[in-house]
Image (spheres, helix red, strand yellow):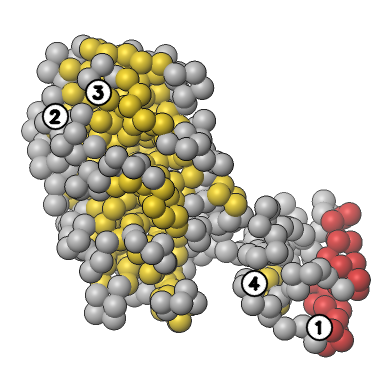
Amino acid sequence: MEKSESVSHSLRPSGLPPKLLCLWNSPSKNTKRLGSGCLNYFPKDNFTKQQVTKFTKFTALQIRQLTKKILLVWAAHNFQQPQGMLLLRCHPKRALPQKVSCRFCPVMGKLQSKFRHGTYRYRPDGFIEERIQTKAFQEYSPAHVDTVSVVAALNSDLCVSGGKDKTVVAYNWRTGNAVKRFKGHEREITKIACIYKSSQFFSASRDKMVMMWDLQNSSQPRQQFSGHTMVVTGLTVSPDSSQLCTGSRDNTLLLWDVGTGRCSESASVSRNLVTHLCWVPQEPYVLQTSEDKTIRLWDSRGLQVAHTFPTQQHIQTHCAVSEDGHKCVSCSSGFGGEGCEATLWDLRQTRNRICEYRGHFQTVASCIFLPRALASMPAVATSSHDCKVKIWNQDTGACLFTLSLDGSGPLTSLAVADTISLLCASFSRGIHLLRVDHSRGLELREVAAF
């Protein structure tokens, strides 16, 4: 097989020259018989409403001819990289008879690059200062045999995770060993809620059930909560561990007595397809995000809506509340940089929007507040389907650091493990253990995967 060639170039925001435009468009007529390769174009300034992405496929001979023509066009037009544009990359390969292999930065999730890990340091003015090559990491025994949907910290040593393998796993991320596996759900695990620094936790599933587990007891559920008619997509436990709140795509929220397993309150709002629930510390309030692009604050005393935040432009996928209960952060779906943001809100009397965090190119699936011991300043972390974890300055919205987990697939969940570590769940490579390093400023690197 001939050695593959690689070309990188940039395009003017105002449009392509006629000759290059012809080269760009003509292969699309013959995509069925062409080999592998891809072209990606990410406009950041002039095309804010959509991401212009083109995938075209070429045989090895065609790509050599096309590359030669493009180089001639570049020379004729004196192309320069415009400010605010990302590089366009083409990674051609020889066509295969049946199975096509295409290596490029992950965009759609299933087509993934090899395991490359890169991080970016940002200057105060927002420009990338340098790319830092991360060190090798440890591969522990895998916690799951399929996609991991959610991960949460049980204590400073153990985490609890669930995924498409229908199993809930308690895992010691310090030693790299599975402590216990819990089986009882009939479908994918969607949410995990832990009673921190205890042995008890809850799991929700697409089988419409919520189960309570105890690490010190048998592998059978200690309590079962059945009441929803569709997949359970929201799960949170009260600060005193006496109540459990669940939400579903059936538009309902249910409040449960943990001791008896009985439903004490029920509420329903039209089109309120719940995506996440989070209990406000030391308060009787529950924060909720929804597919109707709305963030609601519920009063658990009667399960009534206490406040509805301004409707957003995109589906709200996740939410988190600060330790003092004064602020919350939500994140949204999106693609190509449209949407894909996280938003900081004031939970006190004004309940205004404080700040936005923009920089992801696909759906932001999870957002958390970082403890003060972990970051030297108030900070927020987000994980996205674009395979990146970002750390943001909570007050200014500046991106402080980006860790790219290429090959991991969409990142699904993010949790604080201890004062220097984060846990990140992914589609393709299980759970990533990330370490915050202050030796060269604020850095984030992967130290293990399981």
Q: Which residue is mark 2?
A: 241
Where does the image place residue 423, in percent across and percent down from the top left? 29, 53
Separation of disc 1 and disc 2 at Cα? 65 Å
- The x, y position of residue 56, in whole percent, is 77, 59
| Res 237 quadrant in image | top left
Q: Element under label 4?
A: loop
| Mark 4 neighbour class, 10 Å CA radius: few under 14, some 14 to 19, many 20 or more | some
For discs 1 and 2, the disc positioned in front in the rendered view: 2
> Can residue 101 be seen by looking at this rendering?
yes
Asked whether disc 2 touches disc 4, contact meaning CB atoms under 8 Å apart, the reply is no
Q: Are marks 3 and 1 in contact (CB under 8 Å)?
A: no
Using residue 388 as the reference point, say whether residue 70 is left or right of it. right
Lower sequence index among marks 3 and 2:
2
Q: CA distance from mark 1 to mark 4?
A: 17 Å
Q: Looking at the image, tell me whether mark 1 or mark 2 is earlier in sequence order.
A: 1
Q: Which mark is residue 74?
A: 1
Q: Residue at x 51, y 48 (%)?
A: 363
Element type where label 3 sits in the image: loop
Q: What residue did someone put label 4 on?
A: 85
Query: Label 2's element?
Result: loop
Residue at image point 28% right, 42% down: 348
Q: Specify which label sits upstream in the sequence, 2 or 4.
A: 4
**Marks 3 and 4: in contact by CB < 8 Å?**
no
Which of pointers 3 and 1 lies earlier in the amino acid sequence?
1
- On screen, residue 305 above or below 433: above
In the rendered image, the quadrant that contains the N terminus is bottom right
Residue depth check, mark 4 versus mark 3: number of the one nearer the observer: 3
Query: Tag 2: residue type?
Result: Ser
Question: Residue at horizontal 27%, vertical 61%?
Answer: 378
Indicate which disc, 4 or 3, sits on the residue closer to the N terminus. 4
